[in-house]
Image: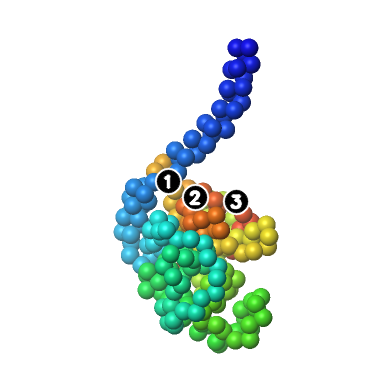
Amino acid sequence: ILILSVGLGFWFGKPLAQSLKAEQSEPTLEQADILIAELNSAPKSSRSLAAQALAYSQRPISYDPAYYKISYPNGDVPYGKGVAADLIVRTFRELGIDLQSAIHEDMKENFRSYPNLWKAKEPDTNIDHRRVANLQRYFERHAEVLEPSRDFSAYEPGDIVVWSLADAEKHIGIIVPGPAERGGEPWVVHHMERGLSWEPALLDYEIESHFRVSFD
C-alpha cells in the first residue's frame, strides 16, 4: 500500500510540479522594465523597437480581428483591442513611423504587387495595414530580408518574423531578449487568439520570413 501510495503521488504530482514550475518561470513586469530601459539606450533603432514591443506586451489587449472604420493617417482600432498586425503597427508608431499610411501609399502605386487574398479592388486604409500578408510584402519591399533560420544567433532584438501556422494562416511578431538569465535568447512578443505574449516561441511555428528594419 505504501509503495502504491508513493507511486500514485509521484504520477499525479508530476504534472502539478511541472505546472508550478512553468508558473514560476513566467517573466515578470520588473524583468520587462529592466530590459526596456536597457534597449531604450539606443533611441530610434531596432533595439528601441524591441523595447516598444516589450512595453506593449504588458498592455491589456484582447484579441479582436474585427473590421473597424478608422481615421487616416495615424488611425487605430480601440485601445484595448488588436491582433498580431496591430502589435507591429503600434510599436512602429511609437517610433514615429505610421505603417498605415506607408502601406497605403505603397499599395496605391503598386497595388498588383501586394497579395490580393480578400478580393479587394483598391487599397483600404481601414484594414490593409492590419493584414499580416500585406505587412510581409511591405517589409519584403522596404526592409532588409534575411534568410529564415533555426539558429538563434541569426536574430537580433527588433527583428520581425512572419510564421506560417498549421492552418496556413500567417502570423507575425517581434524579436526581443528573454528575461534575466535567458537574456541571450531570442524570445518573441506576439499576439495570438489565446492572448498577447512575451515568450520563447520563435521555433514553435514554421518561420516564413525574417526582416530587419533600419531606423537611420
Residue 122 in percent (x, y) is at: 60, 86
Identity of the residue drawn at 52% across and 36% down: 19
Q: Which residue is mark 1?
A: 27
Tell me the kind of residue under disc 3: Asp
Q: Which residue is mark 3?
A: 204
Tell me the kind of residue under disc 1: Pro
The mark that comes first in sequence, 1 or 2, is: 1
- Say what secondary structure mark 3 lies in: loop
Q: Which residue is mark 2?
A: 199
| Quadrant of the rendering where the N terminus is positioned | top right
- Distance from disc 2 to disc 3, alpha carbons, whole Å, reads 10 Å
Give me the disc on residue 184: none
Specify few, some or many for label 3: CA neighbours under 10 Å numbering under 14, 14-19, or 20 or more: few
- Say what secondary structure mark 1 lies in: loop
Q: Is residue 66 visible?
A: yes
Q: Are marks 1 and 2 in contact (CB under 8 Å)?
A: yes
